[in-house]
Image: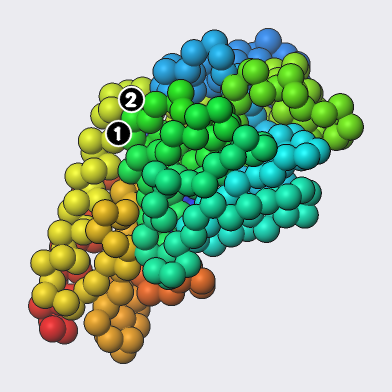
Amino acid sequence: MVYRYNFNAGPGALPKEVLEEAQAELQSFQGMGASIMEISHRSKAYEAIHFEAQQLIRELMGLSQDYEVLFLHGGASLQFSMVPLNFLTEGKAAGYVHCGTWSGKAWQEAGKIGETRLLASGMETGFKQMPDLSRLPLSGDMAYVHLISNETIGGIQCHSFPDTGEVPLVVDMSSDIFSRPIDATPFSFIYAGAQKNLGPAGVTIAIVRRSLLECIPDTIPDILSYRIHAKHRSLYNTPPVFSIYMVNLVLKWIVKQGGVQGIGARNRQKADLLYNVLDNSGGFYEGLAYKDNRSIMNVTFRAHNPEIENRLLDELEQEGFLGLKGHRDAGHLRASIYNAVTYEQCKALSDFLIGFQRSNG
Ligand SMILES: *Cc1c(COP(=O)(O)O)cnc(C)c1O
């Protein structure tokens, strides 16, 4: 198995330029004679990387001073528990939108901590469609509403977000952060594990509205408190220094690509390329998600019969197109075309799919 093209769902592809940069200074960071992994996280050299990465996130998202940027441990999955521990206070209920595997997990974990309410579900359509977010049954006793902007496994994505008024809106953007321009102002809390669009596993980015920090109870452990992490500028304990360093390099790479505008336009072209192959295949291939909710990050599809599909997966692997087998919950095929996957790589995949249909159709 040799990678020529990386379509992995997560951890996903990283920009080649970033890997080269990291390699060049792996043993001697900025000529110091030691790597970034071997120096104090309290050193000036590390701090510069850490705070620069936070600043780049601010600039790329256009965040106002109302928000704090945090680096956390434990993956996006820890946020499924940390969000309710911090925000689901006594006497309140948390609203969840269920649109696939990850949002189901988030909802389930929150239920262990406090009262939850299911506000909308995509279950009836087999999670092939985002539920209607325009008429969520909100009420005054709600601690927050939790959404997932891109369901990585089913390949569906929110193309607009609900107005939740006074109720804070929380969103898991693990698989589409910085993939397109997003206005942060409707959100009170945004989080994303880094390993899909931002860097290696090990760090989770969180963006929190400062006014929410004040209401966090003192009774939760410090290591799980957003207020404590904010107070220490995400240096409460040893942060995942190498992951944050890599995120810093990826953020600078995004800036060089024309920021989220530039990346977003390219991602749209990459996704269109693949969806067009599916739609023009006369039923040989079929996209799994409903058209209006298709993800520009995870293209889920199937071939018209299982035997052909298995042959396709085998041939893809032989040709070095890797990571295309769908998640065990969804099956079929999935091309994850995160920021670091190039247009040329998507073109190679689309050409391959067209050729495969020609020889097997
Ligand atoms: C991958 C993923 C997660 C889980 O991330 P971990 O960092 O492995 O905990 C959560 N939510 C979404 C939307 C994801 O794509």
Residue beneath disc 2: 259
Mark 2 secondary-structure assignment: helix
Q: Residues within 10 Å of mark 2 (few under 14, many from 20)?
A: many
- Marker disc for residue 32: none
Is 9 placed left or right of 242 in the picture? Answer: left
Residue beneath disc 1: 263
Q: Position of residue 281 (x, y in %)?
A: 13, 71
Nearest the viewer among 255 and 316 is 255
Q: Position of residue 66 (x, y in %)?
A: 56, 14
The C terminus lies in quadrant = bottom left
Task: Note whether ligand 1 is within 8 Å of mark 1.
Answer: no
- Up the image or down, 57 lies above or below 355; here it is above
- Up the image or down, 196 lies above or below 184; here it is below
Q: Residue furthest bottom?
A: 307
Q: Identify the residue at horizontal 28%, vertical 86% (top origin).
A: 305
Q: Position of residue 349 (x, y in %)?
A: 23, 61
**Dots 2, 1 in contact, CB < 8 A:** yes
- Which amino acid type corresponds to the residue marked 1 in the rendered image? Ile
Q: Identify the residue at horizontal 63%, vertical 18% (top origin).
A: 210
Q: Identify the residue at horizontal 33%, vertical 25% (top origin).
A: 259
Nearest the viewer among 16 and 267 is 267
The answer to whether any part of residue 249 appears in the image is no
